[in-house]
Image: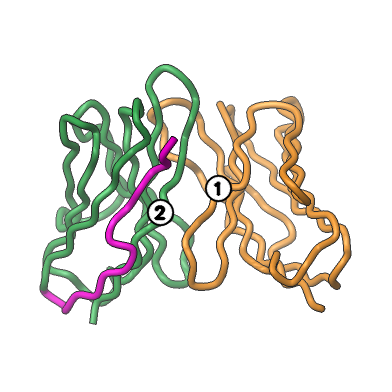
Chain colours: A green, B orange
Amino acid sequence: EAGVTQSPTHLIKTRGQQATLRCSPISGHTSVYWYQQALGLGLQFLLWYDEGEERNRGNFPPRFSGRQFPNYSSELNVNALELEDSALYLCASEPRTAYGYTFGSGTRLTVV
Amino acid sequence: KNEVEQSPQNLTAQEGEFITINCSYSVGISALHWLQQHPGGGIVSLFMLSSGKKKHGRLIATINIQEKHSSLHITASHPRDSAVYICAVNKGYGNKLVFGAGTILRVKS
């Protein structure tokens, strides 16, 4: 069974640009979570999508947004990139009816 | 007080030593994760536990739900085990994970 896949693995953007990160959950998983790990900091919760809806978000500005598609894959968009957005972005997925929280390997975003 | 506390924060061991990293939590959980992150690398899920004990190669994870405590053991440690080990708890479906601060492990040859 394929795990949670994230793309791209690495992404380099210029300050002010927009970045789009993608996550494909495990088949049958309906929830997708996004986390940020900035340099020197711990993992911070960003967003939770379930059944196509944003259910919860962490303490991040509106520049951070996303969506979940009918096939439960998800996109994270970061607009007006700032240098401090440079981080590892981690996606995780979970099924509704059984426990199976699973992480992707992450996208490392560098803003220059 | 953080909901998830890990100890020690830093650990240096000699190759071959038996290593234990501890995690205590103060909330009800549905499961607990042990994660590994090598310098500059992504995060790998080592174990997901809701009870008892799991073993994978030289790694063993245990959890005591009543005591709200989990341990990660590494037997016959090796320099390639050098990484940050993170404990995270899940408080139930739809809840974000709550992470410990991590334990930085360095295994010297």
Q: Position of residue B36 (x, y in %)?
A: 59, 56
Check disc 1: other Cα within 10 Å, few if <14, some if 14-19, many if 20+. some
In the rendered structure, which amino acid carries the disc numbered 1?
Answer: Ser
Kindly state the secondary structure of the residue where label 1 is placed: strand
Of the pair A53 and B5, the residue shown nearer to us: A53
The image quarter in which residue A97 lies? top left
Which of the numbered marks, if any, corresponds to residue A9? none
Residue at image position (51%, 34%) is B90
Indicate whether A101 appears above or below A58: above
Chain of the residue where label 1 is placed in the rendered structure: B
Question: Does the magenta segment cover residue A13?
Answer: yes
Of the pair A27 and B94, the residue shown nearer to us: A27
Which of the numbered marks, if any, corresponds to residue A44? 2
Question: Does the magenta segment cover residue A75?
Answer: no
Range shown magenta? A1-16
Residue at image position (34%, 30%) is A27
Residue at image position (38%, 53%) is A90
Q: Are marks 2 and 1 in contact (CB under 8 Å)?
A: no
In the rendered structure, which amino acid carries the disc numbered 2?
Answer: Gln
Of the pair A8 and B6, the residue shown nearer to us: A8
The image quarter in which residue B50 lies? top right
From this viewpoint, is residue B48 visible?
yes
Kindly state the secondary structure of the residue where label 2 is placed: strand
Indicate whether B65 appears above or below B41: above
Residue projecting furthest to the top: A97
Q: Position of residue B29 (x, y in %)?
A: 57, 29
Q: CA distance from mark 2 to mark 1?
A: 17 Å
Q: Residue tagged by mark 1?
A: B45
Tell whether A64 sits left or right of B44: left
Residue projecting furthest to the front: A1
Picture mark count: 2
From this viewpoint, is residue B1 visible?
no
